[in-house]
Amino acid sequence: MEAEKIILPSGKTASLVATHTLTTVHDTTVKSVPIAEKKAIVFFIGGAGDQESYYFQGAFHNIDSARNILDTRISAMKPLSKKYTSWPKSYNAARGSGSIQTNFIANIPSKLCPIYIVGHSLGGWNGAHLSRILSEAGYTIKFLVTLDPVGEGFWVWMGSDIYKSEASPIAETWINIRASSSKPDTSDGVAEFGGRWIITNGPTTNKTMDIHHASADWMFIEPVQGTKSACDLIFDSINGIFGQ
């Protein structure tokens, strides 16, 4: 400590040691601790030409029709709607670690959130891979729904941003639906050319429907377990977690 000089009456100088009194500092600021948000996150992943043009065809937004059905149903229940968010994504958004971080993980508030993946066509193929990637990153995949997934064909590998190997999905429930129309249309021809993923084992439910490949919405609402559709089962799961 530095000494302070003073002059005495005699004219001489003397030093005083300076002292400091320590006072307790009281911080009255209210500290807020962030709480991880928990809500249901549903990713709807479209196929080729769904969210963007594909070889000058589209965008057709087939997966958006399926998404709108679930969104409308949940929005009618105000308390539940606050615990739900859905996102439409392109199949190529689910390819590559950078894209997955930006397009999926960045849209998930926390690892407490139950995740649902609904993929159509190439979106079903890449979405199945996504289920494993997110699971291994610590997220819980409650449902994976693959709507007539496509990705087995060599030529579609050459022209599309998809994984080259078959997926090994991780999900608590996996529903796979194969479209096999008795009166095929153009979309069915495109799916055959792309190479439908013929799944023989793995899904919790594996269903074949007399329906066109493009009809993602109908596949989503047709019964797959008794009278329940994939849409019903996802709704019931979300309501079971967050419903009052």
Image (cartoon, rainbow, N blue to C red):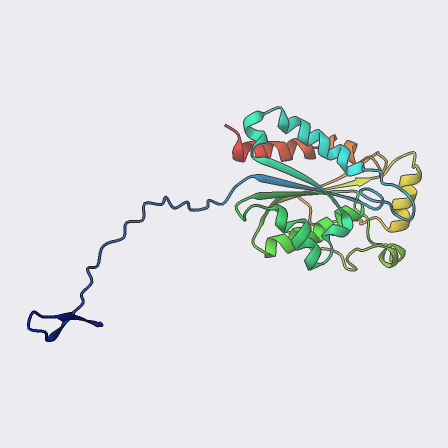
Could you tell me residue 202's position as x and y percent?
Answer: 69, 49
- Residue drawn at the location 36% of the way across and 45% of the way down: 29
- Extreme residue toward the left, this view: 10
Could you tell me residue 236's position as x and y percent?
Answer: 60, 32
Residue 201 is at least partly visible in this image = no
Which quadrant of the structure image shows residue 85? top right
- Residue drawn at the location 82% of the way across and 52% of the way down: 151
- 192 over 21 or under it: above or below: above
Residue 95 is at least partly visible in this image = yes
- Extreme residue toward the top, this view: 76
Could you tell me residue 228's position as x and y percent?
Answer: 67, 30
Q: Give the mark count.
A: 0
In the rendered image, the quadrant that contains the N terminus is bottom left
Which quadrant of the structure image shows residue 83? top right
Could you tell me residue 171's position as x and y percent?
Answer: 63, 48
- 75 over 130 or under it: above or below: above
Classify residue 21 as left or right of residue 31: left
Q: Nearer the viewer, residue 95 or 140?
A: 95
- Residue drawn at the location 57% of the way across and 50% of the way down: 139
Classify residue 5 as left or right of residue 223: left
- 72 over 149 or under it: above or below: above
- Residue drawn at the location 81% of the way across and 37% of the way down: 61
